């Protein structure tokens, strides 16, 4: 194996390691985002927001009927 081909192989190995590291980083970010999303989805709806929705629904039913 020549020096040039050995250097190319080393560069490819480093690039593969960089890609693996990037994939692991992206996977970790995805896991964290899913966890945060699940927390938000499972939070209760604030009473004030439910009141706004009820009033909007009553207004729509009265105006559209």
Image (spheres, helix red, strand yellow):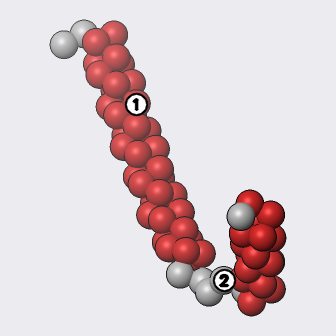
Left or right? Give the position of 40 relative to 63: left
Instruction: Identify the residue under disc 1.
Output: 15
Which picture quadrant has residue 3? Answer: top left
Q: Position of residue 39 (x, y in %)?
A: 55, 78
Instruction: Identify the residue under disc 2.
Output: 45
Q: Position of residue 32 (x, y in %)?
A: 51, 66
Q: Residue at x 29, y 22 (%)?
A: 9
Left or right? Give the position of 36 relative to 51: left
Q: Residue at x 53, y 63 (%)?
A: 33
Q: Residue at x 74, y 60 (%)?
A: 64
Which numbered dot is residue 26? none
Which picture quadrant has residue 63? Answer: bottom right
Mark 2: which secondary structure?
loop
Q: Is residue 60 visible?
A: yes
Mark 1: which secondary structure?
helix
Q: Is residue 62 above or below residue 7?
A: below
Which picture quadrant has residue 55? Answer: bottom right
Q: Nearer the viewer, mark 2 or mark 1?
A: 2
Q: Is residue 58 above or below residue 47?
A: above
């Amino acid at each position: 194996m020549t020096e040039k081909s050995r250097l190319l192989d080393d560069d490819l190995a480093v690039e593969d390691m960089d890609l693996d590291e990037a994939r692991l980083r992206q996977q970790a970010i995805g896991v964290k985002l899913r966890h945060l999303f699940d927390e938000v989805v499972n939070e209760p709806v604030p009473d004030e927001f439910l009141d706004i929705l009820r009033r909007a629904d009553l207004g729509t039913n009265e105006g559209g009927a």
